[in-house]
Image (tube, grey):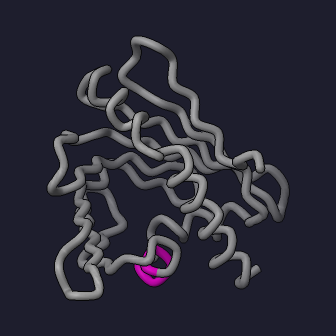
Amino acid sequence: MEQKTKVHAEDGKQEITITRDFDLPVDLLFKAYVEPEFIEQWMNTKVLKQESKKYGSWEYETRDPKGNVAFVATGVIHELIPDQKITRTFEMGGTPFGVQLELYYFEAVTEDTSRLRMHVIYESVAQRDQVLKLPFAQGINWAHNRIEEVLGKLK
């Protein structure tokens, strides 16, 4: 089955572009990235902090069934334009990957559909290539499917 989320990575560059069309109005898609209750549902993680504003910070954590921390991610929101754009940093704890810069562009395609374009910039080409060796494309496609599933119930 073809993945709906498209990941584009040019050789020799330290960035990737991710594009996905959603069967969601743009305001609901935007809420998936700024409202803690929605983030927790589609990411299946705990939102420890979500300051959805300029210079706000965020922190997410997932624990395994034994209560051990399995995933931690943190960052700072540098720009937030409702229903249009989020610029933030992203750092995943316990990994060799450094801080990345993420730019999210939200676009209404029709009244009931929207497009998300993500521009992710890594510290180096090597770091980006390391991420792409992981099942990254499948993971982001799964996450986007979950957004559509969780927020689609609110349409």
Magenta region's main secondary structure?
helix
Residue 55, image x, y percentages: 24, 56
- Taking the spot 34% from the left edge, 63% from the top edge, the residue there is 53
Q: Quadrant of the C terminus?
A: bottom right
Q: Which residue lies furthest to the bottom in this view?
A: 66
Residue 86, image x, y percentages: 44, 51
* Part of the protein shown in magenta: 36-40
The image quarter in which residue 120 lies: top left
| Of 145 and 65, the residue lying toward us | 65
- Taking the spot 83% from the left edge, 62% from the top edge, the residue there is 111
The image quarter in which residue 7 lies: top right
Residue 151 as seen in the image, left or right of residue 39: right
Residue 145, image x, y percentages: 65, 64
Q: Is residue 5 magenta?
A: no
Residue 75 as seen in the image, left or right of residue 132: left
Q: Which residue lies furthest to the top in this view?
A: 12
Q: How many marks?
A: 0
Residue 138, image x, y percentages: 56, 50
Q: Does the magenta stretch include residue 39?
A: yes
- Taking the spot 39% from the left edge, 46% from the top edge, the residue there is 87
**Residue 26 higher or lower than 49, as above or below:** above
